[in-house]
Image: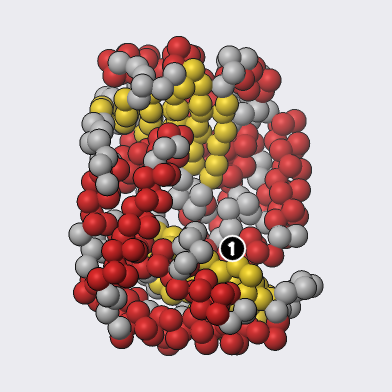
Amino acid sequence: MNLVKSTFFTHQFSNGVRLIHLPSSSSVAHCGVVINTGTRDELKNEHGMAHLLEHMAFKGTKNRKAFHIIGRIEDVGGEIDAYTTKELTCFYTSFLNRHYKRTLELLSDITFNAIYPEKEIEKEKDVVLEEIQMYKDSPSELIFDDFEELFYAKHPIGRNILGTPKSVKAISRQNIRDFRQRMYNTDQIVITSVGNIKPEMLVRWGEQYFNAHPASFRQEKREEVLSTEVFDKVMKKRTNQAHCITGIEAYHHAHPKRYILRLITNMLAGPAMNTRLNLELREKKGLVYHVESFYTAYSDSGVLGIYFGTDKAKVDRALASIQKELKKLREQKAGTLQMSRARNQLMGQIAIASENYSNMMLAMGKNMLFFNTSDTIKETIDRIERITAEEVLEVSNEIFKQDLFSTLIYK
């Protein structure tokens, strides 16, 4: 696989804000702000705060009303959006290269100058409450949140991102301002960019719009994930089919073996149709229509899981087939052809995904935030190419301990 090695430009401003940029020849640029703040950083009385704050950033600043915020990008044909995770908040944009300056100014404005008007807070709470209800109507999505809530039962990282109707309704304007003051620290913010612009211009505008804000350094340390729960639980739901997740604790996002586990996850039930579990559960036995594996890595923990939906009478057979495939991974070393196919498949998926510069921009920002650098696509491909069958066997035995699997079933 012949990939050109890209060179990142990085810079740190005096107030702690960092910048990472990847040059591109495209006329379209992508730029965002990634903040090391998410649901796990909320206090008990703040459940849903990070997500609501992300919504409210677009509802007015010291300089703009809500419709001016959206119009600032959309009036020139660009797009702006945001999302919240358990550990991150991201504001991101796509636009023509000539509009870099206005984009950086706007991103700075919504990050630092949001004012959270009372009237808008109440309206946005209703929007979030509708989002919560809509989510409850989608069991194939809700089960992921319920699984993590049980899995991390003693830790705030287990709480769902949206909050509960009760917790969202209780949030006040002062609560939002206090949370931003405490958690939107300049040393926990990264500007990330992919576009056709000289790095010195990014630094100049970064100085003007981001470094102008006083330094604020993170004082609080996140509550460490010390343990996870092992459970086997059935929840009664009014669904036509059963939904199930079975999973186990896995490596954190900086673990040296994370790439090996990512390869194994892809071998089990990645997006391709020829994965082990898709062939066994769907094509061979007709037990499921859809099966997928996932590996979610946090800064100090991780979870590897397998989701499937099936007829309620077939759940036990499907779970037994999954454990049978996991046992094969623990006991049978993959052959040369199997390993070559698995590596090439994952490398191809990564290379194709890298063509989406918006996704790449966000991934760069996250890597810069946590590692103060970012791997190029070539470096990532090189790591995967070096994975051996012996390493796959070793990691499978480290992770897939049958008595430590937890299972949640909607039935």
| Figure disc tally | 1
- Up-down: is 316 above or below 16? below
Q: Nearer the viewer, residue 24 or 106?
A: 24
- Up-down: is 298 above or below 126? below
Q: Position of residue 84 (x, y in %)?
A: 53, 45
Q: Nearer the viewer, residue 410 or 331?
A: 331
Q: How is the image coloured?
A: secondary structure
Q: Position of residue 125 (x, y in %)?
A: 72, 42
- Residue under circle 1? 145
Which residue is the extreme one toward the front?
337
The amino acid type, in three-letter code, at marker 1 is Asp
- Up-down: is 259 above or below 228? above
Q: Position of residue 27 (x, y in %)?
A: 44, 18
Q: Quadrant of the C terminus?
A: bottom right
Q: Position of residue 274 (x, y in %)?
A: 47, 67
| Residue visible at 70% across and 45% down in the picture | 128
Quadrant location of residue 337?
bottom left
- Up-down: is 87 above or below 9? below
Tag 1's secondary structure?
Answer: helix
Quadrant location of residue 304?
bottom left
| Residue visible at 58% across and 74% down in the picture | 282
| Residue visible at 58% across and 14% down in the picture | 76
Circle 1 packing at 10 Å, graded few (<14), some (14-19), many (20+), is some
| Residue visible at 56% across and 60% down in the picture | 159
Is residue 119 visible in the rendered image? The answer is yes
Is residue 224 visible in the rendered image? The answer is no
Position of 250 compared to 323: left or right? left
